[in-house]
Amino acid sequence: MGTISRGFTGRRSSTDAKLPSGQYLTTDFPILSAGPTPHIPLDRWEFVIDDGTNVLRKWDWKSFRDLPTDTMTVDIHCVTRWSKLGTCWEGVSLDTLLADVKTDASYAMARSYGDYTTNLPLKDLRNKQGWIAFRFDGEVLAAEHGGPARLLVPHLYFWKSAKWVRGITLMHHDKPGFWESLGYHIYGDPWKEQRYSDDV
Ligand SMILES: Nc1nc2c(c(=O)[nH]1)N[C@H]1C(S)=C(S)[C@@H](COP(=O)(O)O)O[C@H]1N2
Ligand SMILES: [Mo]
C-alpha cells in the first residue's frame, strides 16, 4: 500500500487518532456555501419545528436566546477532506428544543434560509449531539459561517451542519436533502468514510 510510513514503532500520534481516514488538518476555517449568503435580520429570524403539516414549536430570536445554552469544543470534518480540531461554539441543544415535542418520527430534515436542506436521523440530534449554534470562538457567528445561527452536528460530515438554519421538519421516513440527492451519503459518518451514496 502507498501509505506514508509511521516509523518503526508504528505508533499513531494523538493527532492522527482524532483524524478520520482520508482527512487532513487545517487551522483556518474554510467557507463552503452552495449559494449566496442570506442575511437574516434578527427581528425577522425564527426557528420552527414542524411535522410537515403542523407547526409544533416556534421561537423568535428573543425567545430562542432565552433558552439555556451549552458551550462545546468539537472536531469538525468536511467531506472535501479538511478537518478542524477543537472548535469552540455556543448554542442551544436540540434536546432543549425538542423537550416538549411529542413525536414518533425517526428522521428530521433541517431547513435553511436560502433553501438548503439536509436530512438526519432524529436520534442523531438528541443526547447532546446536535445544537443550533450562534457563537463561534467567543464571537457572534459570522454570516458566511451560518449566522445568525446554524445547525452543528459534529459527529457527521460537516455538510449536515446546515448554515442559516430556520427549522427542522420531523419525518417518519428518511428523505435525501440537498447534497444527499446529488450523490452524497444519506447518513455521512466521517469515521466510516460515508462520503458518497454507494459508500457502505
Ligand atoms: N445552508 C447551507 N448550509 C451548509 C452549506 C451550504 O451550502 N448551505 N454547506 C455545508 C458544507 S458542505 C459544509 S462543509 C459546511 C461548511 O461550513 P463553513 O462554511 O462554516 O465552513 O456547511 C454546510 N452547511
Ligand atoms: Mo462540506
Image (cartoon, rainbow, N blue to C red):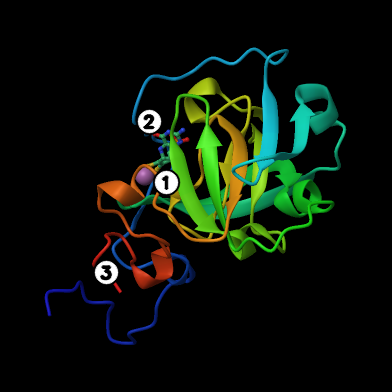
The residue at label 1 has a CB less than 8 Å from ligand 1: yes
Q: Amino acid at mark 2?
A: Ser
Q: Which mark is residue 159?
A: 1
Q: Secondary structure at mark 2?
A: loop
Q: Which residue is mark 3?
A: 199
- Under circle 1, the secondary element is helix
x 39%, y 46%: residue: 26
Residue sticking out furthest to the left? 2
Dot placed on the residue nearer the N-terminal end, 3 or 2? 2
Q: What residue is at 59 percent from the left and 43 percent from the top?
A: 52
Rendered position, 95 above or below 63: below
Farthest residue, direction bottom: 9
Marks 2 and 1: CB-CB under 8 Å? no
For marks 1 and 3, the one nearer the N-term is 1
Look at the picture and state if 200 lies above or below 35: below
| Residue 198 percent coordinates (x, y) | 23, 67
Q: Residue at x 48, y 51 (%)?
A: 119
Residue 91: % across, % down = 72, 41
User: Is the residue at mark 2 in contact range of ligand 1, meaning its CB lies under 8 Å from it?
Assistant: yes
